[in-house]
Image (cartoon, grey):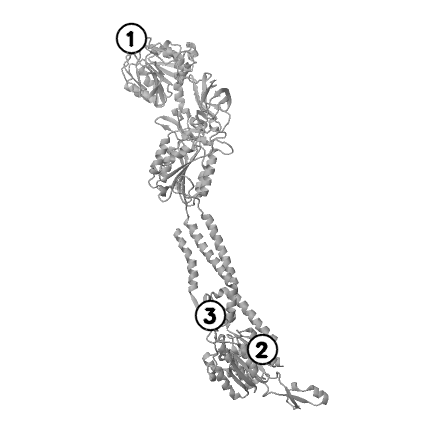
Amino acid sequence: MLAGLVAVGVPILIHLLNKFRVRSTDWGAMKLLLDSVKQDERKVKLDDLILLLLRCAVVVAAVIAFAHPVLKGSANGGEASGPVAAVVLLDNSASMGQTGGALSRFEQAKQEIREWLDALHPRSEVAMILASDSPVPLVAEPIDDAVLLRKALDEAPLSDKGSGLMDSLGMAVDALAATKDRPKEIRIYTDGQRPLLPDPEALRRLAREHPEILIRPILVGAAPAANLGIVSLEASGGIPSPGRLLRIHAKVLNAGPGEAVNVPLEFSLDDGTPAGSLVIPRIAAGSTAEGVIAFSFPAEGPHALTALLPADALLADNQRSLAVEVARRKDVVVVNAGSVTGGFVAKAIAPVAVEEAAKFFLAPLPAEMDELPGLLAQQELPFAVVLCEPQEIPAATADLLDRYLAKGGNLIVFPGAGWQGGDGLLPAALSAPIGEGTPGVTWQGRGLTHPVTRLWNDAANGNLGSVVLMKHFPLDLRAGEALVTLSDGKPGVAIGHRGAGSVVLFAAPLQAEWTNLAIHPAFVPFFQRLLGELDRGAQGGLNLRPGEVFRKILKPEESGKNFTLHLPGQGGERSGGQLAASTEGTVLRCEDTWPLGIYRASVEGEPVAVFTVGLDPEESRLEQIPAADLAEWTTVPREAIAEPVQSRTVVLKDFLPLLLWILVGLALVECGMAYRVTMAR
Amino acid sequence: MNPPEFDLLDPEAVSRGDALGIMARKIVEGYRVGEHRSPFHGFAIEFAQHREYSIGDDTRHLDWKVIGRSDRYYIRQYEQDTNFVTQLVVDGSASMNYGSSKLTKLHFAKVLAACLAHVILLQRDAVALALVDEKVQDYMPRTDSPGSIQQIMERLARFQGSAKTSLGESLLQVSREARKRGITIIISDLLDDEEGLARGLERLTYGGHEVIVFHTLDPHELTFPFDGTWEFRNLEGADRLKISPADFRKTYLKNLEAFTARVRATCEKFQAHYLLVDTGKNLAETLSGYLAFRQKAAR
């Protein structure tokens, strides 16, 4: 369009043509005319020259204004002045809620995006994506509707989600795929948290695969001075029941640069009833420390226990809740209770005097294998089934148990001495027994990490290392983990998840010639803790991360009834609907798990579930990826760029508005001057 | 109101004596000068004698002093004939050859002179003719014979003028030719040496002449209406000037106004009558307007 500058010749051409288009005449009053010319010649020439220059300047200004001149800049520096196609990735993970002053990082990012939009060329097209571990498009395809873009930006919410970038980048690259005629850009507004990009190589690869796209990370705010966050809140011990003490473990991360001392934690139950407090004496920088309190729930039913830290830069991780189903009584079916193992197991389930067994929260129900179909067909399923010394699990029984596990049941297996097979359900395969005639192996006694066994890291609680297996079935893990490890490093107890439930497999029956576990002092507490762990596994669906789906299978008679869901926060929103029956049963389902906090579900006024949504612990780690690293990961080496000059040219700010004003000014001056000259003549 | 044919002045006709004569007569008859007193009559006319009043004489000429002294009614009689002459001076300098239409200033001047000669001779006054440019090119001494009108027309028609001009020198010569005082009518654009004009006027008025100046200018010289780019060729020299006239119009008109003001002032200084004539305007109207003024002044 700058070729239009040739139009500046038009006023000059007109000026010259006028000079050549001459008429002539005889004249008598030459003296009068000569005197007049002498008087005015200089002024007239000056006026004409100024007018000619003004007219040329008007033409030049008009051409330049509409040609949108550009200046070349560095590939990674400067801002585009011509139209671009851009995708804005706005990090709305929970860590963007951190504040260092009046505005949170999220609001700062929005402000910077607004300023960039204001400076953007009006014909640019922009898409917007909320970037997190589950990105959401605000404006899926690039558009040039500035009003819509600003509205979408203004309404963009901060979320409680974890950080993540690669999925968002993939969406951005797809959004730009159709753009052909202008520079492409992806602008990432983020706090640059480490968890944002666990694999920098993935980012490098993407940048190399798309050299035509300028990827520009924009770090919002500096790293905060300090942040403490509750990264986990768990219960350990047995099954929660009214009045029964549980150990509540609260783990706190110190994400700041310095040591944190005397960190207070407050606990509250349900609607805020104080439930205790503790002080963590010292947490080193970058480390976590655990505080433990003992707590008993006062009544059966769904409850939530909340731990609270003092407010700091990131509020979202200063509070975490734990949802717990407190049951009055749970039934445990003991199959083949007449066996040696069955006797010990029944005692471990209800380790109380006979006369108190009826009131105990766990009730062992003796049954035979052929009674299982009837027991598992009941509406109210038992909490767990313990198979004591089966020689095999027949296929029909396996199918039955599989369906039971799918509904959240739990299975514990002590294989019989003549185990023959049918271990398709089990978390490990059993090989032929070994150990006869050897000293045997023992359970691991120290360095225990599993929630069931770590209690015994404290020697005051005993020593699991004195549990001996004179003979055992070697376990080959398939779909589970080792709950107990043997001294030879192999699993001694395997646990795995199947359906909504769990399966636990011991390496030996509870017979004296196989193991001393049944008579070990740790057996009963171990078994109680195992049942508690199975219960927590069942209750694992009660404590979710943002975006995870809550499901609970209710009683069949609840089908068709109205349910209400109360969302977190004072005056929290309510949603609801009607429960419907499905092949699994009557399922209460909630997919919108974005606000952090405690959710309460009720059916026709009766509470049926409490669940919590907690922050991804990684969001508490506010350590920032250095800007130089981000730049290096997103910069494509020149040899990798196929068409570097054209696609990587960065233009400076457009001068159109200024030039238009200059154009108007020149035109006004020219008109005024032409009028003045005309009047003068 | 004059018949419309008197508005048209045909340059070709002006160049032929007979046609010029006819034209002049038509213009003058249109004014009906024949029915009026000569406007050039009664000025600077010498008292000759008394005669006794007869019924019907013009009472304006009663000599009241004599009536007061003698109680008799006597009329003053004046010298009219051979002691009173009107000199017509027509400038034929090159600049007079300019005309924005086909009628030049010189054409106009000839017609005007022809009309004036006609008027004067009809009134049985004497007229002399001086055709001048840098000097008196042709001089016709005074005549009061109506038959000499044809000769006057012929001379006017033949007169072409030259490239040079010196009106002042010409006027000096004319003043020497006119032995008796009378009226001198100058028809010129006066685009000449202003000092020379002043000397000429001074000499004429010193000699007792009444001077009337018809300052004839073309409409374009008066309004300078040119647009675009023009080359002006000097009629009185070889120089040329290429300009955008619109650029200088204002200043030119200002200078023209100053020029005519100076000329008027010069005329007034020497008690000469000044009349600015636009050659684009109707000559009959111009003439009749001036003659009517003269008549009023004569009372």
For mark 2, name the chain: B
Label 3 sits on residue: B239
- Do marks 1 and 3 share a chain? no
Q: Is residue B54 above or below residue A327?
A: below
Q: Position of residue B240 (x, y in %)?
A: 46, 69
Residue B171 position (above or below residue A529): below
Based on the displayed image, in which of its 4 quarters is residue A135 positioned?
top left
- Label 2 sits on what residue type? Leu
Alpha carbons under labels 1 and 3: distance apart: 143 Å
Separation of marks 1 and 2 at Cα, in angstroms: 165 Å
Camera-nearest residue between A561 and A424: A424
Q: Is residue A676 visible in this depiction of the protein?
A: yes
Q: Residues within 10 Å of mark 1 (few under 14, many from 20)?
A: few
Q: Are marks 2 and 3 on the same chain?
A: yes
SS of the residue under disc 3: loop
Closer to the camera in the image, A212 or B142: B142
Tell me the amino acid under the disc marked 3.
Asp
Q: Secondary structure at mark 2?
A: helix
Q: Is residue A334 above or below residue B85?
A: above
> Does residue B2 appear in this view?
no
Left or right of residue A219: residue A637: left
Q: Which mark is residue B201?
A: 2
- Residue lying at 61% horizontally and 75% vertically, measured from the top left: B269
Residue B114 percent coordinates (x, y): 51, 82
Secondary structure under the numbered disc 1 in the rendered image:
loop
Residue A437: mark in rendering = 1
Q: Nearer the viewer, residue A219 or B206?
A: B206
Measured as percent of width and height from the top left, residue B173 is found at 55, 81
Select label 1 or label 2 by which is in front.
2
